[in-house]
Image (tube, grey):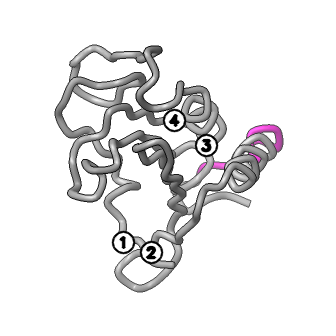
Amino acid sequence: MSAPNGFVPSDAEHVRGIAAIERTRELGFSFLHLRDEHGNVIGLHAERWRHGAVDLYALADQRDAVAARYRAEDYERAGDPLWQVTGTVANVIAELLALPPYGSPERRYAPSAPGPVSGYRDGGRRRSGVLSASVTP
């Protein structure tokens, strides 16, 4: 079975992605469907609020995912993420779950280059198209 964009995930990649999503459910993430203008489900949005931060990821298929961390006060007013990464579902979730707790002295910064980056950021918007879909329960 192929996704709408023609991508056919390998069995191993599919299993890794589903296992990663299930792990986030066990860790307290909440889930919402992402829908297009016709109401069709086109992706998944998951988030977890804790320690003054919001960790989230959104996905359209197994290789089109984005994860980010926001300070809670920035997330509520659509501020810039502290950290963001794009890639496969399994990889972005693994990187998100490997982040140190928000506010800990173990912070990672990313270069201020354009485009998707991995690591804490010093500013600027770099959002995936996945995050721009409408979110509905």
Helix, strand or loop at label 2? It is: strand
Looking at the picture, tell me which residue is in the foreground, 94 or 14: 94
Badge 1 crowding class, 10 Å Cα cut-off, few under 14, some 14 to 19, many 20 or more, is some
Sequence-wise first label, 1 or 4: 4
Q: Position of residue 49 (x, y in %)?
A: 49, 52
Q: CA distance from mark 1 to mark 4?
A: 21 Å
Q: Which residue is mark 3?
A: 89
Looking at the picture, tell me which residue is in the foreground, 65 or 54: 54
Q: How many marks?
A: 4
Q: Which residue is mark 4?
A: 87
Q: CA distance from mark 3 to mark 4?
A: 7 Å
Helix, strand or loop at label 4? It is: strand
Q: Which residue is mark 2?
A: 35
Q: Residue at x 61, y 43 (%)?
A: 89
Q: Which residue is mark 1?
A: 134
Segment tinted magenta in the rendering: 7-14
Badge 4 crowding class, 10 Å Cα cut-off, few under 14, some 14 to 19, many 20 or more, is some
Q: Amino acid at mark 4?
A: Gly
Badge 3 crowding class, 10 Å Cα cut-off, few under 14, some 14 to 19, many 20 or more, is many
Q: Is residue 104 left or right of residue 1?
A: left
Looking at the picture, tell me which residue is in the foreground, 32 or 60: 32
Q: Residue at x 22, y 24 (%)?
A: 122
Using the image, determine if residue 42 lies above or below residue 6. below
Q: CA distance from mark 3 to mark 1?
A: 19 Å
Toward which corner of the image does residue 133 lie, by quadrant?
Answer: bottom left
Sequence-wise first label, 1 or 2: 2
Sequence-wise first label, 3 or 1: 3
Q: Position of residue 23 (x, y in %)?
A: 74, 47
Q: Are marks 1 and 2 in contact (CB under 8 Å)?
A: yes
Q: Amino acid at mark 3?
A: Val
